[in-house]
Amino acid sequence: MTGFPEVLPEEVGTPIPVSPSIPIDTYTYDYIVVGGGTAGCVLASRLSEDGDVSVLLLEQGPVADTWASRVPLLSGNMFAKDSLAARWWSLPLKNADNRFLEIIRGEALGGTSRINGMLYTRGSPGDYNQWKALGHDGWAYSDLERYFVKSEKARSHPSAPFRGKTGMWENRQFKDIPYKTTAYVDHAVELLGIERVPDLNSPDAPAACTGIVDIVQDSEYHRHSTYRAFLHPTLAQDRWKHLKICPNSIVSRLELERAGESLYATGVYFEATNSRKAGYRYLARAREEVVLCAGALGSPQILMMSGIGPQAHLLDKGIPVHQDMPAVGGHLSDHMGVPVAFEVPLSDSLHHLEESPLKAVMELARYILSGQGAFSRPFQNSSTFVPSRLLDDSGSIANKDPRRLDASLPENRPDIELMHIAHDCGDYDVSGKGVYTMLVTLIRPKSEGSVRLATSNPRARPDVDLGFLSDPSDYAPLRKGIRLALRISEEVRKQGYPLMDLKVPDGTSDEDINRFIREHLRTCFHYTSTCRMGKETHGERPSVVDTELKVHGVRGLRVCDTSVFPEIIGSHIMAPAVMVAEKCADTMKGVTTSAERAG
């Protein structure tokens, strides 16, 4: 037992068909939040701060609040038997040798914040200033910093004015990185002219920089998912009268009603995840609004199941069309990673725990006793960001002084991230070897994919076409990033460190590297933009929601998750997802800033 006040579908909804003898108030709430993931936990928590407001939160996965789910290293293993990750295969990558990649997302209260790398990165100000440049007033960095600050309690940056001190969500840096390779790599990066900064989240950090990443971790050195931060058992118990949390529930579609020319979202149809109960469906209604927080894969699926989406696709699946909206499920963006792997001494890699059960037990005991050691942190400890236009064809900084490019300007945003990982992240056969990976990542891809219904069955996983390399211009920055990783490896060897090539390109030509990219390309699981923000449903830049995250043409319906990003940002997307939820909550409550009141 978790001690968590979870409820069953039959306790919060009315059975279908609806009986007129059942009072409508027994299954009606002010707000229904669909999806208790990274953003949904935040939104449900904020909306339920007012005891007079009733909120129903529906989540497809379980609560599953186990000790192992809080241990950083254990919970981040998405391939473990008890992982809270849902996994299925993508459609073939047409432009990458028809390979299939695994689609992975978290399915539990807290969503992907329960299984990810725990990295707290906001992105550069230029990412959000680009959103505003696209016509989205209220979404510039100056508008959004306050929401990052509101949610967080930063333990490692006590004097930074742009970091939160009193929020519900804790993060920290670990300065004592246990793997020797990292120190050599960090020094090599600096020798190549990339500045080291104390806080990668600083709005004043240059566009080309390197540093230690913050991770979301509480005072007990546990993973601080948005579930543990915003909907922990004590808070949920205190609010149980007006906040109902129903895990293990699948929303099959929205209840939509027409009144004249207007379309309204009035509720949701849902059922238990347990397939044995699939024949029992329920309805819950919303007095005010329904908010989809099911993520960039789930939110478009629910819209399309409800008849809101590309008309031809809906008709092909036998779904009545309520609103033709081409952008639903379109414009899927994800960061493309290419692992460049090196062999290192086994003791300098996380693989030493896999090769020695005794060492693993000793490290686990160290974590239990002190909260320190390998189990206290995820796989990644540091990152390097750089705009590829600063790199020449050899992977070197074209000008030794990167001129401290102002990252608040959209044109200066970095488009390459090198994730420094003391582990194999390329699924190579590395038994008995130590591995250090530089995951070369294109963080501003131009390629787009899509999410489409596989069938009209709401229990079926959607078809995900990642669309990698559909825009051939993505090759050039990836090539430069790979050459930068190889230049870094040269500098590491010059320092005398025994770094040996493990998986690197066979040759140095563009085609050699392009082939390496196609063979080893992988997803970073940073799915965005499938219900993107914009001004119109059709036209040159079709979209799904407006700047208040209201679905175009459907009253009483919003989307609040990474699917609303107008463009993918150059950051791991957990912290931005929380920011979106904080802003959405304030918008729904009618909270305005002084700037908004003045404007």
Image (cartoon, rainbow, N blue to C red):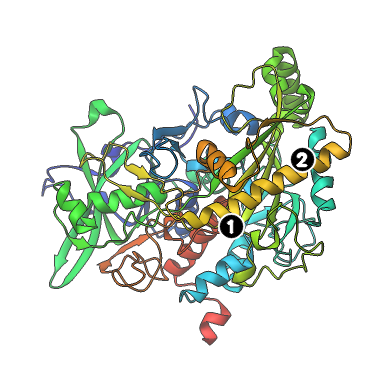
Say the numbered circle drawn on residue 349: none
Vertical side of 6 occupied by 267: above or below: below
Residue under label 2: 489
Q: CA distance from mark 2 to mark 1?
A: 24 Å
Up the image or down, 165 lies above or below 13; here it is below
Image x and y of residue 240, in percent:
43, 45
Q: Is residue 19 visible?
A: yes
Residue 568 or residue 339, whichever sits in front: 339
Residue 284 appears in view? no
* Secondary structure type for disc 2: helix
Q: Quadrant of residue 250?
A: top left
Left-right relation of 448 to 429? left
Badge 1 crowding class, 10 Å Cα cut-off, few under 14, some 14 to 19, many 20 or more, is many
Residue 58 vs residue 440: left or right? left
Q: What amino acid type is highlighted by mark number 1?
A: Gly
Please determine whether, in this image, residue 113 is positioned above or below residue 598.
above
Please tell me whether residue 125 is drawn above or below residue 500 in the rendered image. Answer: below
Question: Of marks 2 and 1, which one's residue comes earlier in the chain?
Answer: 2
In-image side of 121 versus 269 (left or right):
right
Q: Which mark is residue 570?
A: 1
Task: Name the residue nearer the viewer: 7 or 123.
Answer: 123
Q: Residues within 10 Å of mark 2 (few under 14, many from 20)?
A: many
Numbered label tally: 2
Q: Residue at x 35, y 39 (%)?
A: 91
Element assignment for label 1: loop
Q: Position of residue 97 (x, y in %)?
A: 43, 38
Name the residue at 63% across, 35% down: 506
| Depth order, front residue of 468/329 | 468
- Between 241 and 267, which is closer to the camera in this rendering? 267
* Residue 498 picture quarter: top right
